[in-house]
Amino acid sequence: MAFGGVVTFKLEGILPTLKQLKTMDENVQKQVRATLQTQLESWVIDAKAFTPVDTGALQESGRVLKPRGTSLIKFQIVFGGVTRKGKFVDYALEVHENHPTGSNFLGKVVEARSAQLEALLTKDLNTAINKA
């Protein structure tokens, strides 16, 4: 998903697996959130390796946004917007979609790693079910 020069995505494929989470104990929810955060942070590192570099600001803008409010699992990976050093990156979408050497830098990682993430989350949930 992309908007306003920012690249982000949603994990649609694993939603059925994660719907079970709301019925689980708080410790299980914490474990699943920890797994998600750890895995998605590694995805950002991998995506940065595919990101074209001119000034480095686009790479620096890659980050994981944690869930807010009552959402248990609504993490986002974002490239673009304001970096930690205060630079504004409004060209992430253009580079992601059209750059000759870096097109789809985040999409490559999502495609390659989604099945692995689903397996890890399913394992966490199955472990919790078996303990119950």
Image: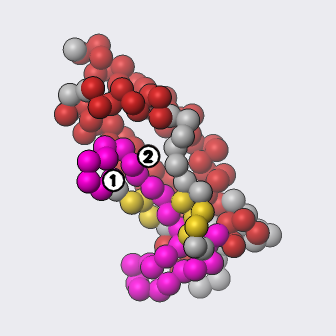
The amino acid type of the residue labelled 2 equals Gln
**Judging from the image, what secondary structure is the residue with disc 2 in?**
helix
Q: Is residue 46 visible?
A: no
Residue named by callout 1: 67
**Residues at marks 2 and 1 touching, judged by CB atoms closer than 8 Å:** no
Q: Is residue 108 visible?
A: yes
Is 104 on the left or on the right of 1, as rendered?
right
Q: What's the colour scheme?
A: secondary structure
Q: Which mark is residue 39?
A: 2
87 or 51, which is in the foreground? 87
Q: Which residue occupies 59% across, 57% down?
A: 1
Magenta highlight on residue 84: yes
Is 100 on the left or on the right of 129, as rendered?
right
Q: Position of residue 115 (x, y in %)?
A: 57, 34
Image height of 99 relative to 17, above or below:
below
Q: Position of residue 83 (x, y in %)?
A: 44, 78
21 or 45, which is in the foreground? 21
Q: Residue furthest right?
A: 100
Is 129 on the left or on the right of 54, as rendered?
left
The image quadrant of residue 128 is top left
